[in-house]
Image (cartoon, grey):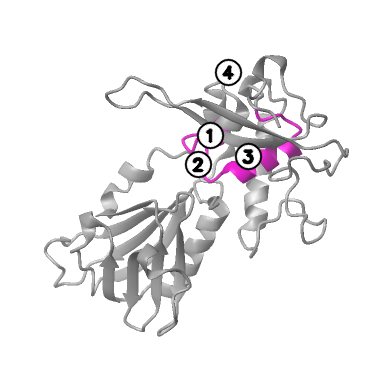
Amino acid sequence: MPEGDNVWQAATRMHAALAGKRLAQTDFRVPAFATLDLAGWTVLEVVSRGKHLLHRLSPPQDADPRAGSAPLSIHSHLKMEGSWQVYASGERWRKPAHTARAVLRAEDGTSVVGFSLGVLEVIPTAEEHTVVGHLGPDLLGPDWDPEVAEANLRAQPDRPIGLALLDQRNLAGIGNIYRNEACFLARVHPATPVSAVPDLYGLVAMAKRLLEANRNRGSRNTTGGFGPRGDSWVYGRAGQPCRRCRTRIQHALLGEPSPAEAGTGTAVQRERDIYFCPRCQPAPPAAQPERVS
């Protein structure tokens, strides 16, 4: 599943492939932008912001009137299954064509293709704040500020740390794998209230180190060893022995109500998988996760 390191890698690859080049063809396969033609526009840069991607473009003198004459940004979010891939001229796509949602081809034949994107839209660059302005400091971005991230987390002291870390408004880039791995390394159960985490600043610093260590790797590894199947401490290892103490890793679901669905007044429980060692990460008595296995 894409997390901050994957998105950073995608931005880096596409920036290397497209930055400074004019687009020869664009194909947006979503109804809202299906007729938009950005041929002739120049790719200024491709950047990541947490789990979001932004292709920033400058217009030609004869820009399509529908696109206007101000710089534009292609905003996308991978969600659970999305990806962007780079292709040389004439290279065959590695994913089914019917899953493509955006195709950007430069004048030299290089293409980038977005498959199964969870979000795809084109907005004025000046309005990027409307789609990423809510995000906390980016663990892999130039705006990273650990003190702000810690303060954001502490603003809800009773919230389980495992939920607070996933909230991109607090700090941007952590997904389910990294929140489980960081909690294990900090010896903190994901259900522990933020106020009860003994070293919150250290936990935030650990999460950053994990993402930084993996942003240039071909495959994610949070342990630094243990052979070909030793890529994680606890994530996905339910029933297997803890790499520290040999106690069996447990799996549970941890969630909180989402805002009431519009028009229904019904709050939906959103639960995500957590993995933990019951010996290294004892759960607080008042914060036991549900459905332990």
Which comes sooner in the sequence, label 3 or label 1? 1
Q: Is residue 232 left or right of residue 254?
A: right
Question: Relative to the observer, which residue lies in front, 157 or 289?
Answer: 289
Mark 1–mark 2 Cα distance, whole angstroms, equals 7 Å
Q: Residue at x 83, y 29 (%)?
A: 279
Q: Mark 1: few, some, or many residues within 10 Å (few <14, many ≥20)?
A: some
Question: Relative to the observer, which residue lies in front, 263 or 77?
Answer: 263
Which comes sooner in the sequence, label 2 or label 3? 2
Which residue in the rendered view is the most extreme toward the right? 245
Asked whether 61 falls inside the magenta stretch, the response is no
Query: Residue flagged by tag 1: what amino acid is it?
Result: Val
Tag 2 residue: 137
Mark 3–mark 1 Cα distance, whole angstroms, equals 18 Å
Tag 3 residue: 179
Q: Are marks 1 and 2 in contact (CB under 8 Å)?
A: yes
Counting from the top left corner in percent of width and height, residue 211 is at 62, 51
Q: From which residue to which does the magenta span run?
A: 164-190
Query: Residue flagged by tag 2: what amino acid is it?
Result: Pro
